[in-house]
């Protein structure tokens, strides 16, 4: 009984020490970034726990494969995944789910937005970004009038270029203008700028920043790749089936 308890305790430590460490790291990273709200801390820590669990499964499996068939770690990892596509493809899908989960959590809890009214040449700031209003231009086509605002975008003092939000006013629906939001995406956050109203005294913009939105789409792509990996036929199994079939046919021919 004592030996069983010791073995159980050893297995528990071996299987959960790394995931728990991942959860703690996720929580500490959030604290270092100034996140103090309870729910986001729990959600990010949970994401760290799951992510480390997935990483540990790949690491443990590759090391075991190396013990059976000496090779480099990457070769062992590829060989391992190829031997059990359903299992490790599933882990890849779960990794994508974690990315989507983190992106949704960050963009839901830590997005910021404000309305700014500025005159030409004036600047506005939100989060890491500073924008300078450079003016507005107009063009017409047979269907609509298009008003385009130009804003020079900087991040922490570094000039990034321009954003050009638009407002489309269709000749047949002048009371229902269409807003075209200008977007600048990075791995850290997305900056959105919408032109609300304007006149000779200036323009009003709705500016908002959503962190980690890009990771939602990266996570979706990872999930798709994991699903495709699971669905790809195992060539070695197919070759083995062909060989078994050929052997069976040869035996039948000899018997006949």
Image (tube, rainbow, N blue to C red):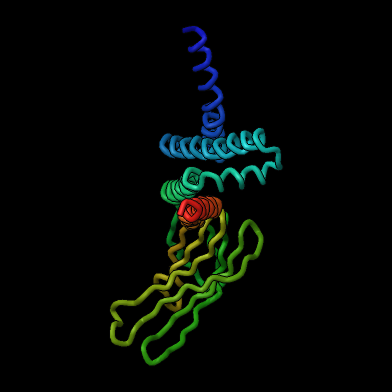
Is the C terminus in the top left, top right, bottom left or bottom right quadrant?
Answer: bottom left
Which of 162 and 75 lies nearest the eye of the viewer?
A: 75
Q: Which residue is more in the foreground, 87 or 178?
A: 87
Residue 4, x across and y down, in percent: 49, 12
On the image, the x and y values in percent for residue 252 come to 46, 53
Q: Residue at x 54, y 22 (%)?
A: 13
* Most foreground residue, 206 or 160: 160
- Image position, residue 88 (x, y; %): 51, 44
Percent across and percent down for residue 117 are 45, 66
Residue appearing at x 51%, y 44% in the figure: 84
Q: As drawn, is 66 to the left or to the right of 144? A: right
Q: Is residue 110 visible?
A: no
Residue drawn at point x = 47 percent, y = 51 percent: 255
Q: Residue at x 47, y 66 (%)?
A: 193
Can the viewer see residue 85 in this picture? Answer: yes
* Position above or below: 8 against 17: above
- Of residues 18 and 77, the one nearer the viewer is 77
Count of all numbered marks drawn on residues in the image:
0
Give the quadrant of residue 187.
bottom right
């Amino acid at each position: 009984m004592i030996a069983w308890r010791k073995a159980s305790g050893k297995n528990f430590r071996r299987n959960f020490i790394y995931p728990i460490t991942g959860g703690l790291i996720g929580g500490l990273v959030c604290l270092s970034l100034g996140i103090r709200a309870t729910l986001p801390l729990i959600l990010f820590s949970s994401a760290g726990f799951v992510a480390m669990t997935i990483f540990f499964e790949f690491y443990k499996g590759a090391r075991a494969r190396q013990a059976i068939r000496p090779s480099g770690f990457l070769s062992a990892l590829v060989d391992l995944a190829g031997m059990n596509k359903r299992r490790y493809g599933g882990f890849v899908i779960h990794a994508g789910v974690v990315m989507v989960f983190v992106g949704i959590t960050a963009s839901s809890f830590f997005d910021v937005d404000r309305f700014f009214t500025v005159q030409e040449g004036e600047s506005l700031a939100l989060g890491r970004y500073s924008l300078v209003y450079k003016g507005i231009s107009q063009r017409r086509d047979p269907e609509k009038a298009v008003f385009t605002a130009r804003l020079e975008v900087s991040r922490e003092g570094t000039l990034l270029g321009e954003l050009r939000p638009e407002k489309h006013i269709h000749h047949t629906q002048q009371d229902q203008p269409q807003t075209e939001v200008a977007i600048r995406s990075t791995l850290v956050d997305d900056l959105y700028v919408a032109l609300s109203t304007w006149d000779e005294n200036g323009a009003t913009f709705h500016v908002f920043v959503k962190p980690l939105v890009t990771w939602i789409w990266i996570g979706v792509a990872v999930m798709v790749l994991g699903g495709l990996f699971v669905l790809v036929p195992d060539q070695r199994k197919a070759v083995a089936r062909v060989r078994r079939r050929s052997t069976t046919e040869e035996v039948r021919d000899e018997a006949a």
